[in-house]
């Protein structure tokens, strides 16, 4: 009996050891499989550029960088906002030259010129006087007659701007610059670069719908963002498609959010630098994916000016540019087009929800 009891005790101890070792193995396996065990997810949002921003990132140190980002955005607006009377841009618009005070002015001019050239002038920051005249600037809605448009068109043309890395000059004082069609995308890149400098590699930055996604989310997957349904009749808050961002910037331009109706006529915020009038065509929204968001933002605006056919042509000629276009066909039915390079990263909303 004593020998039998000793054997039972030994067997029990061995069984407990085996169970404990299995438990430790499983715990260790689960810990290794977890993609965010050492990367707390940080999320915060705020106000900037007349809209909202949202930043999500994974940081082992759990650092809250909101104050730093708010400070950067204040300085950014002080450089490039037309709504701040003493900003660098506002001062340039009052005079004929400006020696840069901030780090933000030269890069936005350089990017603007590149896209202006590539699109044959469809993207043009000197369109500001017409944007304001049609009611999409600080002053509010104001219809224009053909004579007024013709006079304002004499002030439009990026070729009236010359610049280097120190200063910018205008050919005449009445040339007016407005970077609203590129500023949000540029701001996204500025915040993304700040996070990168802080050693953060997994992040999603969004300002007013323009985004930059890098690395992966807390599930170890690519960041996924929604493209809105281009309909001003109540569907614009619904998601039309989802894009997975693999270290890319994304921007969408459309006429379904920023418009007004006067005497039963709809006036969109996209003003053509070629005619001086709000654009009217079948293209409802243009989503552009590029290596940085400033590029995506500028091309998205240009494509809304040019329309679908020219957007396809330019996309195929510019390396690293991908597009997703939503348009009405000849029968008025909503259709979409996606470039080959973006197709593997695009899914319908029926398949999954945006992250």
Image (cartoon, helix red, strand yellow):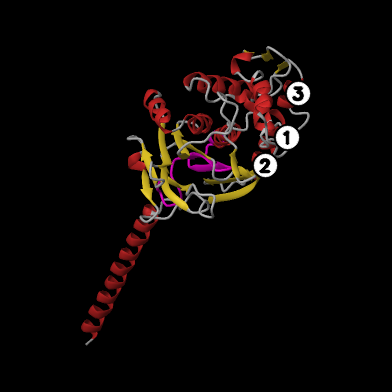
Provide residue 32's location: percent of width, then percent of height: 37, 52
Q: Which residues are magenta?
A: 196-222
Q: Are marks 3 and 1 in contact (CB under 8 Å)?
A: no
Neighbour tally class for label 3: few under 14, some 14-19, many 20 plus, Cα within 10 Å? some
User: Circle 2 is placed at which residue position?
Assistant: 50
Which residue shows up at 54% across the image and 45% down it?
256
What secondary structure is marked by label 2?
A: loop
Quadrant occupied by the N terminus: bottom left
Provide residue 284's location: percent of width, then percent of height: 47, 41
The answer to whether residue 48 shows anywhere in this view is yes
The mark nearer the N terminus, 2 or 3, is: 2
Residue 83: numbered disc: 1
Q: Report which quarter residue 273 is drawn in.
A: top right
- On screen, residue 71 versus residue 10, left or right, reads right
- Residue 219 among those drawn in magenta: yes
Residue 142: numbered disc: none
Which residue shows up at 42% across the image and 27% down it?
310
What secondary structure is marked by label 3?
A: helix
The mark nearer the N terminus, 3 or 1, is: 1
| In the depicted structure, whether residue 227 falls above or below residue 301 | below
- Residue 296 among those drawn in magenta: no
Q: Are marks 2 and 1 in contact (CB under 8 Å)?
A: yes
Tell me the CA gap for discs 3 and 1.
Answer: 11 Å
Q: Report which quarter residue 71 is drawn in.
A: top right
User: Circle 3 is placed at which residue position?
Assistant: 91
């Amino acid at each position: 009996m004593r020998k039998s009891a000793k054997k039972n005790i030994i067997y029990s101890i061995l069984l407990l050891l085996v169970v404990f070792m299995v438990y430790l193995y499983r715990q260790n396996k689960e810990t290794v499989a977890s993609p965010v065990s050492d990367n707390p997810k940080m999320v915060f949002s705020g106000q900037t550029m007349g809209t909202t921003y949202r930043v999500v990132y994974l940081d082992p140190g759990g650092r809250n960088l909101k104050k730093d980002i708010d400070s950067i955005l204040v300085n950014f607006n002080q450089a490039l906002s037309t709504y701040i009377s003493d900003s660098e841009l506002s001062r340039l618009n009052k005079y004929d030259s400006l020696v840069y005070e901030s780090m933000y002015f030269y890069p936005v001019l350089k990017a603007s010129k590149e896209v202006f050239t590539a699109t044959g002038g469809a993207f043009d920051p000197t369109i500001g006087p017409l944007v304001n005249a049609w009611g999409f600037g600080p002053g509010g809605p104001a219809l224009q007659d053909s004579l007024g448009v013709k006079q304002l068109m004499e002030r439009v043309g990026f070729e009236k701007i010359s610049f280097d890395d120190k200063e910018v000059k205008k050919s005449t004082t009445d040339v007016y610059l407005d970077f609203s069609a590129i500023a949000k995308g540029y701001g996204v890149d500025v915040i993304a670069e700040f996070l990168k400098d802080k050693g953060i590699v997994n992040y999603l930055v969004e300002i007013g719908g323009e985004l930059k996604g890098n690395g992966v989310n807390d599930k170890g997957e690519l960041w996924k963002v929604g493209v809105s349904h281009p309909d001003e009749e109540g569907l614009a808050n619904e998601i039309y498609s989802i894009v997975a961002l693999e270290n890319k910037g994304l921007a969408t331009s459309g006429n379904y959010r920023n418009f007004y109706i006067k005497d039963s006529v709809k006036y969109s915020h996209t003003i053509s630098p070629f005619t001086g009038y709000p654009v009217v065509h079948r293209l409802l929204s243009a989503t552009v994916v590029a290596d940085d968001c400033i590029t995506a933002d500028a091309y998205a605006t240009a494509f809304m000016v040019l329309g679908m056919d020219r957007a396809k042509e330019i996309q195929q000629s510019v390396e690293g540019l991908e597009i997703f276009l939503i348009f009405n066909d000849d029968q008025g039915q909503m259709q979409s087009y996606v470039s080959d390079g973006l197709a593997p990263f695009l899914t319908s909303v029926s398949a999954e929800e945006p992250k």
